[in-house]
Amino acid sequence: MSTKFNRGKAYHGSSAVTEGKLQGATDTDYFYFFCPVCEGKQIMRPLDYEVRQEQPDNPYNDQLKSKAVKGFTLAFKLHCEKCNLTDFVKVSNLGWQGGDFEARVKPA
Ligand SMILES: [Zn+2]
């Protein structure tokens, strides 16, 4: 039995999910990722997650009004039952902390 994320294999989100291609939405307060390959909004199934990084401090706390309890990066392994795409996405509070997304992604 393997408990290692992605069975210990290297992983990184592919070009299928980068640059805004992976989108999602909430229904109640649950967030769903939509398959970036399939037409429409096919919900992807989270197969696994991992705490990639966790630290007791957050390096942005002294620069911002709000205070994060810790620093973290979570990785999710997502799968589409319809087209069999398996891919990865990360959520972190060690990257951008706010501001306008479009301005961040496409600096002048
Ligand atoms: Zn799909």
Image (cartoon, rainbow, N blue to C red):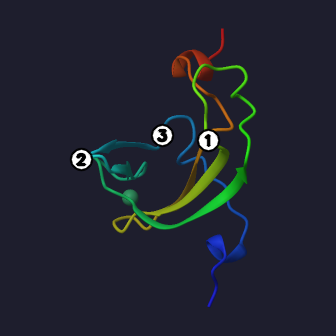
User: How far apart, in angstroms, are the residues tagged by discs 3 and 1?
Assistant: 30 Å
Of all residues shown, which one is farthest toward the top?
108
Decide: marks 2, 3 in contact (CB < 8 A)?
A: no
- The tag earlier along the polypeptide, 2 or 3, is 3
Residue 39: % across, % down: 31, 49
Residue 69 circle label? 1
- The tag earlier along the polypeptide, 2 or 1, is 2
- Front label number (2 vs 3): 2
- Of the residues shown, which amino acid type is indicated by label 2? Thr
Q: Secondary structure at mark 3?
A: loop
101 relative to 43 in the view: left or right: right
Residue 28 circle label? 2
- Crowd tier of the residue under label 2, counting other residues whose Cα lies within 10 Å: few below 14, some 14–19, many 20 or above: few
Q: Is residue 100 above or below residue 48?
A: above
Please report the residue visible at 64 percent of the width from the left and 59 percent of the height from the top.
51
Q: Is residue 54 above or below residue 85?
A: above
24 relative to 60 in the view: left or right: left
Residue 59: % across, % down: 75, 33
